[in-house]
Image (cartoon, rainbow, N blue to C red):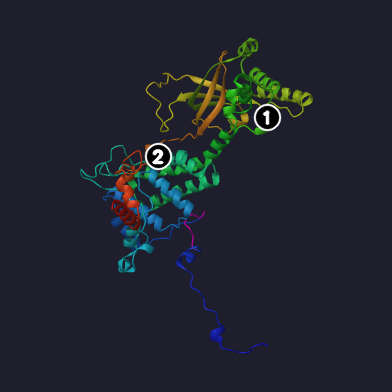
């Protein structure tokens, strides 16, 4: 049976209203490739120029309101929001999330009659502290306070360099896609600051920071590839020949390919080491090495900065081609990669660690040269920082035992990194007063009242 006709009102389905969060998903985020801010009305432009960002207004007030207005005009998804907050915190601005401060936790009566700007200020997470007085002089030690500016300076380029070279690398775990997202968030914010003329006194610094964003995107893939390829085939062969095998077990999970590590026997290692030394060293040094009883005299770990990169000459490449052509006939699959040289100098890499009072760098700083494959050299840049363990041989030849870290040319360590997880000291908990356990008073509070009264009654009956 088919029902004909009927009440159209009953058959018509009610349309459900979409929540505001669902509607916003169709809007742009502000991070699209060709996104640009909507033009302002003359009244809005005048307000920004004369009320919000006038040059006579304190910089801290301008930049704080700029950050809050920027967040309101961008749809920062979770990943972008977290990365932007860490960038601000590294710059000394408290961007920690505050509970019960969003519009969902504020009653409608309080919001009635307030403008959008007033609601934004009320619910903002990004704050620059301005506490003062004897009671607050050392209270907000984690964040910048304009009343106590000692040790702080306005440096957009420096904060971006520190964020890109240290904090962002840790947050993204080597993922270039996530790293690119972090750089784009910072660049988007810096362009917003420039567009709205927030701080014209720092115009040059802002432009340098934007250039650094492009440099970071260009250089970090090379840094990651260099770290992945080091220490290279030659240094691995030297390590297999002259380092203690028990010591090598500590480096089982280094950057070398597992199959290459397993297949590199002593005979193959000697062929790689001998041929590379014969081609890459000068004639006198090669003869001296051929006659000497080679051994490692000392091992040390240092930080270096790349001074010069020297690829293999055409004559050296011809020799490598000749040797590889011969090896192809006698040892199928065996190949010795062409090598050049990297010249470095020792540096004190500021990374938050205390080097101790005895740490010294010679003056003038001597240059040191290491043999590396051209496959690695093509990714390196002059100015890159390398932290590595080096073996010195009795003939003066040095080889790399292990590379701890590779840092970009713009590497900058900001002391604020040490304060990101800092917690203000407070009064100890009563349970922690006694090392042997909680105090009797604390235990008493934990007992249910009924149980406590029952125990008292039992004690009274026993006494009677």
Residue 371 visible in image: no
Residue 272, by quadrant, is: top right
Q: Residue furthest right?
A: 329
Say which label, 1 or 2, has the lower sequence index: 1
Residue nearest the observer in this picture, 363 or 413: 413
| Secondary structure of the residue carrying numbered label 1 | helix
* 399 displayed left or right of 335: left
Rendered view: 258 above or below 126: above
Rendered view: 114 above or below 420: below
Mark 1, residue position: 262
Was residue 133 drawn as part of the magenta stretch in this picture? no
Residue 311, by quadrant, is: top right
Residue 219 visible in image: yes
- The residue sitting at 56% across, 88% down in the picture is 7
Determine the main secondary structure of the stretch shown in magenta: loop
Which disc number belongs to residue 417?
A: 2
Chain part drawn in magenta: 27-33
Residue nearest the observer in this picture, 329 or 241: 241
* 309 displayed left or right of 99: right
In the rendered image, residue 240, in percent from the top left (x then y), is placed at 63, 23
Rendered view: 284 above or below 58: above
Packing grade of label 1 (10 A; few <14, some 14-19, many >=20) is: few
Marks counted in the figure total: 2
- The residue sitting at 51% across, 32% down in the picture is 405
In the rendered image, residue 158, in percent from the top left (x then y), is placed at 40, 39
Disc 1 and disc 2 in contact, CB within 8 angstroms: no
Rendered view: 409 above or below 172: above
Residue 262, by quadrant, is: top right
**Callout in the foreground (1, 2):** 1
Was residue 31 drawn as part of the magenta stretch in this picture? yes
Q: CA distance from mark 1 to mark 2?
A: 40 Å
Packing grade of label 2 (10 A; few <14, some 14-19, many >=20) is: many
């Amino acid at each position: 049976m088919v029902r004909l006709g009927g009440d159209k009102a009953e058959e018509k389905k009610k349309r459900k209203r979409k929540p505001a969060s669902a509607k916003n998903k169709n809007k742009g985020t502000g991070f699209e490739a060709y996104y640009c801010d909507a033009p302002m009305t003359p009244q809005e432009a005048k307000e920004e120029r004369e009320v919000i960002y006038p040059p006579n207004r304190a910089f801290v007030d301008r930049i704080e309101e700029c950050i809050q207005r920027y967040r309101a005009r961008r749809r920062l998804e979770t990943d972008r929001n977290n990365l932007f907050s860490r960038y601000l915190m590294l710059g000394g601005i408290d961007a920690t999330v505050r509970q019960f401060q969003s519009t969902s936790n504020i009653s409608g009566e309080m919001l009635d009659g307030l403008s959008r700007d007033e609601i934004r200020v009320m619910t903002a997470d990004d704050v620059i502290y301005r506490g003062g007085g004897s009671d607050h002089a050392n209270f907000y030690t984690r964040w910048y306070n304009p009343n106590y500016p000692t040790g702080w300076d306005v440096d957009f380029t420096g904060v971006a360099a520190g964020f890109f070279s240290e904090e962002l690398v840790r947050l993204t775990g080597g993922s270039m896609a996530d790293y690119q997202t972090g750089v784009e968030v910072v660049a988007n914010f810096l362009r917003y600051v420039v567009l709205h003329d927030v701080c014209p006194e720092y115009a040059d610094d802002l432009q340098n920071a934007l250039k650094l964003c492009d440099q970071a995107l260009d250089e970090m893939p090379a840094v990651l590839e260099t770290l992945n390829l080091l220490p290279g085939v030659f240094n691995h062969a030297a390590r297999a020949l002259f380092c203690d095998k028990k010591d090598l077990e500590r480096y089982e999970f280094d950057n070398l390919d597992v199959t290459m590590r397993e297949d590199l026997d002593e005979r193959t290692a000697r062929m790689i080491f001998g041929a590379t030394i014969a081609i890459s060293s000068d004639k006198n040094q090669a003869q001296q090495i051929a006659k000497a009883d080679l051994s490692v005299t000392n091992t040390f770990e240092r930080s270096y900065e790349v001074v010069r990169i020297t690829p293999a000459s055409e004559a050296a490449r011809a020799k490598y081609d000749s040797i590889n052509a011969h090896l192809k006939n006698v040892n199928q699959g065996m190949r010795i990669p062409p090598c050049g040289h990297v010249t470095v100098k020792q540096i004190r890499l500021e990374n938050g660690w205390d080097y101790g009072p005895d740490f010294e760098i010679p003056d003038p700083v001597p240059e040191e040269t290491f043999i590396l494959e051209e496959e690695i050299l093509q990714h390196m840049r002059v100015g890159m920082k390398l932290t590595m363990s080096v073996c010195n041989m009795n003939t003066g030849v040095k080889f790399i035992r292990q590379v701890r870290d590779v840092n970009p040319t713009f590497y900058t360590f900001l002391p604020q990194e040490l304060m990101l997880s800092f917690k203000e000291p407070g009064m100890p908990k009563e349970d922690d007063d006694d090392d042997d356990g909680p105090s009797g008073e604390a235990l008493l509070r934990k007992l249910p009242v009924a149980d406590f009264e029952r125990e008292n009654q039992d004690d009274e009956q026993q006494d009677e």
